[in-house]
């Protein structure tokens, strides 16, 4: 199945070289921290704060997990399907997401995760009754990070540091590593961005 690749596909793979930490530094604003530590579906939260939502696939490929991205559940050298996407609210880029899906996890009912197309990964796995989320880690990205070419291509500010998070999801005890970076100007940096109910 061919993916509808975006005009940004030449940037793929972007990769994420980050210093992942187990605690949120004190410098982080409380509203940014709220987004970073929110354990519910990020897709659902973004949709609740926008009139329109869409996902743009940068690309996906099978490769080996690098040492710098490895974790307890996804080891360096494991064969993984890497998928990178951008999530938009009202046509404004909000999140860059990079998922590592071990090939050993893409079996049984989870085979469909290899062919999501423009469907968000979170939307699928949060519907699973067997979903477990392991501890979140956070990282700060500087204006000179390897996301800089993406921000430039999207016309985003190159003057602010920004934040991301990652965690391992277990679906039927099969691990999937998902990192989500809140791009400059995202709702996560705007106080009182939440929809009132």
Image: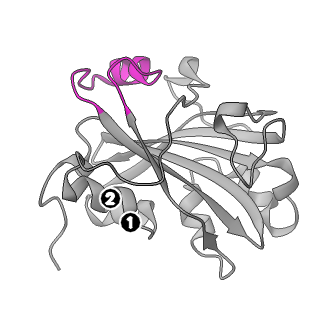
Does the magenta portion include 110?
Answer: no
In the displayed structure, does residue 104 sit left or right of residue 13?
A: right
The magenta segment: 141-161
Where the N terminus falls, by quadrant? top right
In the displayed structure, does residue 193 sit left or right of residue 26?
A: left
Residue pictured at 19% horizontal, 51% vertical: 29
Q: Nearer the viewer, residue 168 or 42?
A: 168
Horizontal and vertical percent for residue 98? 57, 41
Q: Secondary structure at mark 1?
A: loop
10 w.r.t. 64: above or below: above
Residue with the mark numbered 2: 35
Q: Main secondary structure of the magenta part?
A: loop
Does the magenta portion include 143?
Answer: yes
Q: Is residue 183 visible?
A: no
Q: Nearer the viewer, residue 9 or 21?
A: 21
Q: Nearer the viewer, residue 76 or 35?
A: 76
In the displayed structure, does residue 89 sit left or right of residue 101?
A: left
* Residue density around tag 2, few if under 14, some if 14–19, many if 20 or more, within 10 Å: some
64 w.r.t. 8: above or below: below
Where the C terminus falls, by quadrant? bottom left
Q: Which mark is residue 38?
A: 1
């Amino acid at each position: 199945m061919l993916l509808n690749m975006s005009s940004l596909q030449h940037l793929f793979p972007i990769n994420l070289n980050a210093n992942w930490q187990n605690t949120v530094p004190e410098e982080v604003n409380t509203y940014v921290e709220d987004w970073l530590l929110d354990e519910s579906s990020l897709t659902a939260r973004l949709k609740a704060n926008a009139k329109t939502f869409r996902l743009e696939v940068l690309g996906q490929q099978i490769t080996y997990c690098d040492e710098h991205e490895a974790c307890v559940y996804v080891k360096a050298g494991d064969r993984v399907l890497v998928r990178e996407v951008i999530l938009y609210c009202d046509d404004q880029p909000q999140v860059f997401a990079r998922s590592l899906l071990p090939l050993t996890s893409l079996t049984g009912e989870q085979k469909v995760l290899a062919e999501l197309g423009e469907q968000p990964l979170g939307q699928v796995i949060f519907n699973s009754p067997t979903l477990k989320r392991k501890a979140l880690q956070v990282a700060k990205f500087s204006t000179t990070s390897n996301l800089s070419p993406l921000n430039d291509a999207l016309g985003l500010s190159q003057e602010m540091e920004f934040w991301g998070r990652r965690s391992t999801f277990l679906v039927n005890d099969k691990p999937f590593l998902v990192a989500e970076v809140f791009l400059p100007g995202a709702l996560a940096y705007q106080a009182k961005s939440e929809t009132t109910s």
